[in-house]
Image (cartoon, helix red, strand yellow):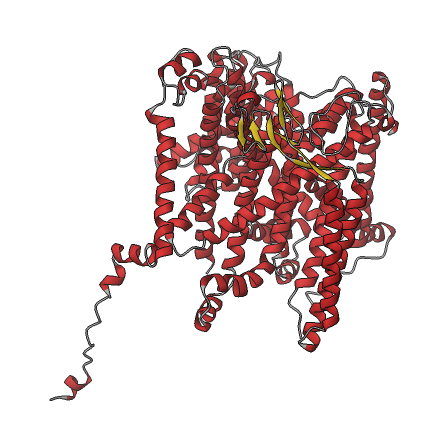
Amino acid sequence: MNFISPSRPKPGIANSILSCLNKDSTRGVVIQAATLGLVLATLLYLFSNSAQNLDQLGLSFGFDFLQTTAGFDISWSLIAYDPSMSYWRVFLVGIVNTLFLSFCVIVFGTIIGTIVGILRLSPNPLVSQLARCYVEVVRNVPLLIQIIFWFTTVFSALPPPRSGYGFAGLIFLNNRGFYMPSAVTDMSGWLIAAGSLMLLGTLWFLLRGIRRQQRQSGSVRPSYRIAFAIWGIVLCGMALIVGSSLHWSVPALQGFNLEGGMFLPSAFGAAFIAMAVYRSAAIAETVRAGMESISKGQHEAAATIGFSRFQTLRLILIPQAIRAIIPPLANSWLVATKDSSLAVAIGFPELVSVFMQTSVNQTGRAIEIIAMVMGFYIVVSLIISYLLNKYNAHVQFKAR
Amino acid sequence: MSEQDLKHFVPTPPRLPARNEQNLRHRIQKQCFNNIGNSLLTISVLVLIYYVAKSFLDWAVFNAVWDAATRRECLDISPDGACWAGVIDWFNGLIYGRYPDEEQWRVNSGVVMALLWLLPLMSQRIAYRNSILISWITLYPFLGAYMFLGGTFGQDVGIIHMVFTSLAAGYFILLYLNWVLCAAGQSSLPEMVTPLTSKLFRRGQHMTGFLLVWGFLSILCGVVLAQMHLEPVPVDHWGGLFLTLIIASFAITMSIPVGILLALGRRSKLPVIHWLSMMLIELVRAVPLITVLFMAVTLLPIFLPSGAEPDKLSQVLFAVCLFAGAYMAENIRGGLQAIPDGQYEAAQTLGLGYWLTMGLIILPQAMRLMIPNIMTSFISMLKDTTLVSIIGLFDIMLMARNISNDKNWIGLHTEPLALISILFFVMCYGMSQYSLNLEKRLKAHRS
């Protein structure tokens, strides 16, 4: 009679086991347990192998090597380093060099990229096509080739120090690198850093206060002006104190090399230019996409009010486009930090080069060192994505 | 005047198009020379283009040396021109690395075979497109490895490798026999033997027919191949563009299955699988490729039992596969998230299980949505293969750098780099234009 009623399974021990096995929840537990077991077994197998292999090589596992003397020289370092320092110091040197290179790349890459991205939208077809050619050529040639190109055919082809280029006797460029005057002071760097940090902090605090007041009352209380004046006086005073103890160290030719001043090796120059150019192409595309995401009505409305092209860009387009641009831009910065590791190919002493190559060869502590280097990159990426999330929450269109 | 005439609609003739607005001269005037600033900009861009193009062409073409024995000779002939003679001298090395000259036909025929295998996919009328693709991914690597590595059946080629190589060769021949037969209007080979098999088997006659023909051809191929002897070429002699393409195509093909598995794992409701996939994806994506490569090269020998140390190429392939898979997983996850819940519910209503839902309903749609991103990933994988030169594999990048160490061509850096830059540019730009084209076609198809 009722043809479609499911035939109920007869109660029985076999059937109840079957239906229990067929339940989604049981299956989930079994699958998860199996996966976990498999992963754990693989890890255990790998670690037992590694213990055996390390035993055979006479090595042990541990981070005690960080305290031992490194004993090798690093060609260039932003913080003080000499071969008698420990491997921990080598790690720090690598991190600082990596961060310095990435920072320079990010700043210049973003500036060039923004300009090229805006040129790409120029109403002049010649300009926009030129910008497009730049982006396409730079984007479609691997970064490593570009780095090596800049290093071997541009920077290494420069004349030696004795006949290098000099500008006004202050800045020098030769096949070893780039020399420029640097300010040397007898005061401790920490003191100056703390002072500048304090000044910047107060400035930010003042500006925030003024902004809030402007919003609430439409005018600024005179007390803020006085505060500003005091701030300026303190700034001048500090500049005077620091300036009086300051003297310039100018690079000068001594023997076959230049001494004194600040020195950037040619490997840095090549890596920096190649990476900044490469990054600028990616950022240009991001900026263009962000700008094109704004509807045409906004352009027309701006034109109706009588805004010039520059005003339209500054007041209408960029503030709106920035919401679409910032997330991919931050991602691009993260990629720039990761890409800075390619400088290892031309011997720039960044983290991978000094720690993952030289230190692994010297100590044989591959597991620990690779974990530390990867840990550093993971921390950087976590910080950038945390800041990005904060920013995103901040600039989201707020429903009022 | 009849009613007919009144009702007859006489359109006023359309206005002529404003011709001044349309012609080229007017457009140039309006876009490039509409005011002084823009005119100056246009002129300076033209001057810039002229100087860049002129100096490049002078260097690369007009002052270039095409025939010389050493770099010194090049410089004597033309000091400020490109010395293409060195690149021509090393061209074989750039393409094949240190692969022996007399065995290079194997590389050529292996690559041609790979392309021929995929050629039927270009035709819209071919049946079983998926099976061709799957066979390419699963079977071709064995045939390719046999062609490239060489060896004799039963001696340096293991039994499993032997069997799969024969199966691959058999499949390849069957594919083309069928194609030729179909083009000639005949029925395909499996269909020809179906009358025989239908007497033996009641069910699945087509399948058994296919299997019979395939098996027969494979045994035939195995017998033929067993008579052949290919000179063994170890992996460390591979190099040049050949090695670059092997690594890139391996990364591209393996990234899809690995990416699908990781993406499904990350979307899974089972917490253990979700967390494991997520950790793997995020860990790999947070670190640069070069550290993953270093990890594979230094840690794999430590983690694997002593004696079972894989060669460098396998280590690199493992690393690249992991890296590409993690990036692909995020692309596919993006596609999965864009599929509305209704699709899952509809599939459930039809009574499909998890794998059928994913395989038949969700993934095909998700992959199609993500084609532009997937193509972008492919391009960056191709570009990233140059990194293997840092850990000492002789890919095209390292071969190009090595030319400057040759005693005849000391210091010849620019020309090889220029050549491989152009090569990569052509490959990557071609891929990106193809992806744009595909995107446009799919958009037109959907709307």
* Left or right: A85 in relation to A337: right
Q: Nearer the viewer, residue A339 or A115?
A: A115
| Residue B67 in the image, given as x and y percentages of width and height | 36, 15
Say above or below: B181 vs A391. Answer: above
Depth check: give the residue in front, B130 or B7. Answer: B7
Which residue is at a point 62% across and 40% down the rendered structure image?
A: B257
Q: Is residue A306 left or right of residue B332?
A: left
Q: Quadrant of the N terminus of chain B?
A: bottom left
Q: Position of residue B184 (x, y in %)?
A: 34, 35
Residue B342 seen in the figure = yes
- Work out which residue is located at the far left of the displayed protein and give it: B1
Res. B204 visible in picture: no
State the residue at coordinates (75%, 45%).
A242
Image height of A291 relative to A134, above or below: below
Q: Is residue B144 above or below residue B335?
A: above
Locate residue B88, reporting x and y percent.
41, 18
- Residue A72 placed where, x, y %? 76, 21
Q: Residue at x 50, y 10 (%)?
A: B407
How many labels were placed on the picture?
A: 0
Left or right, A55 with reference to B29:
right
Determine the residue positioned at 64% across, 18% down.
B158
Q: Which quadrant of the structure image shows residue A337?
A: top right
